[in-house]
């Protein structure tokens, strides 16, 4: 199977993210396009989406999975990002390296388990390597079992666990993948990528 991926510029990409996030009812705090623009505006970033035809209307193509990532720097002024960097300080080296933070992403329920997230992750890794990044980091929670399993399949290493006593499902799990040519050489998906906006 060939995965069809659109790689968006900021403004259009932010609107597309706002749109696709409407399909993720399981997560109450969905991102708005202005939040996406504010976060990504002054840093290297990537917005990718995979598309697929509707099973009962093959002529109609819809976005089914997405991934948004951005550079994370040693010195951040945004309070949330500064806090993230501080939490990663003991397990990620920032100085002299380029670190990509995999911020948000997912696959719409009806399209899960068909390789869309792997395809987007492989596209993210290719782009990151081409753009000088050394490492991808991502944060999730213990109770997001599907995401944890997926990151395991995608060969992310757990680098930190912040336990939440009394509520282990809410413990935060930080994962990372060091990038190199060998990572891209192990990619499995066949992708057709279109740049938009
Ligand atoms: C996690 C999620 C993104 C996976 O997307 P997907 O498109 O179904 O993933 P893929 O089909 O590309 O699967 C990638 C790999 O993960 C594995 N995988 C995916 N879902 C899995 C699950 N629920 N349990 C075990 N393994 C799983 C697949 O087997 C595959 O491995 P392989 O390529 O080695 O065969 C999707 O389930 C999702 O959007 N979940 C909700 C989002 C979420 O949990 N967010 C938490 C906030 S961080």
Image: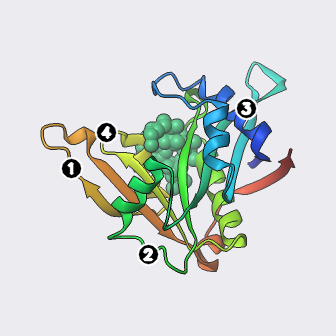
Residue picked out by circle 3? 15
Of 65 and 60, nearer the camera is 65
Task: Mark 2 or mark 1: name the one nearer the start of the chain.
Answer: 2
Distance of mark 4 from mark 2, alpha carbons?
Answer: 27 Å
Task: Mark 1 or mark 4: name the one nearer the start of the chain.
Answer: 4
Of 62 and 12, nearer the camera is 12
Q: Nearer the viewer, mark 1 or mark 4?
A: 1
| Residues at discs 3 and 1 in contact (Cβ within 8 Å) | no
Distance of mark 2 from mark 1, alpha carbons?
Answer: 22 Å
Up the image or down, 107 lies above or below 98; here it is above
Distance of mark 1 from mark 4, alpha carbons?
Answer: 12 Å
Residue picked out by circle 1? 163
Q: Is residue 113 visible?
A: no
Which residue is outermost to the front? 77
Distance of mark 3 from mark 2, alpha carbons?
Answer: 33 Å
Question: Is label 2 in a helix, a strand or a loop?
Answer: loop
Distance of mark 3 from mark 1, alpha carbons?
Answer: 35 Å
| Residues at discs 4 and 2 in contact (Cβ within 8 Å) | no
- Find residue 143 and name its label: 4
Residue 109: quadrant of the picture: top right
Question: Is label 3 in a helix, a strand or a loop?
Answer: helix
Task: Say which residue appears at 76% left-offset and 54% top-offset.
Answer: 191
Instruction: Name the spot of residue 132 as percent of width and height, x first.
Output: 67, 74
Task: Mark 3 or mark 1: name the one nearer the start of the chain.
Answer: 3
Residue picked out by circle 2? 93
Task: Mark 4 or mark 3: name the one nearer the start of the chain.
Answer: 3
Instruction: Name the spot of residue 146 as percent of width and height, x first.
Output: 42, 41
């Amino acid at each position: 199977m060939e995965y069809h991926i659109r790689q968006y510029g900021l403004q259009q990409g932010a609107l597309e993210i706002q749109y696709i996030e409407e399909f993720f009812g399981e997560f109450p705090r969905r991102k708005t396009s202005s939040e996406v623009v504010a976060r990504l505006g002054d840093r290297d970033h990537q917005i990718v989406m995979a598309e697929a035809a509707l099973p009962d209307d093959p002529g109609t193509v819809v976005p089914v999975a997405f991934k948004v990532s951005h550079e994370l720097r040693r010195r951040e002024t945004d309070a949330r990002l500064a806090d993230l960097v501080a939490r990663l300080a003991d397990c990620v080296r920032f100085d002299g390296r380029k670190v990509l933070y995999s911020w948000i992403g997912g696959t719409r329920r009806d399209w899960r388990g068909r390789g869309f997230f792997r395809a987007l992750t492989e596209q993210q890794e290719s782009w990151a390597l081409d753009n000088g990044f050394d490492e991808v980091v991502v944060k999730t929670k213990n109770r997001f079992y599907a995401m944890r399993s997926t990151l395991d399949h995608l060969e992310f290493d757990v680098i930190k666990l912040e336990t939440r006593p009394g509520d282990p499902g809410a413990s935060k799990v930080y994962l990372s993948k060091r990038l190199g040519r060998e990572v891209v050489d192990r990619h499995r998906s066949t992708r057709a990528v279109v740049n938009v906006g």
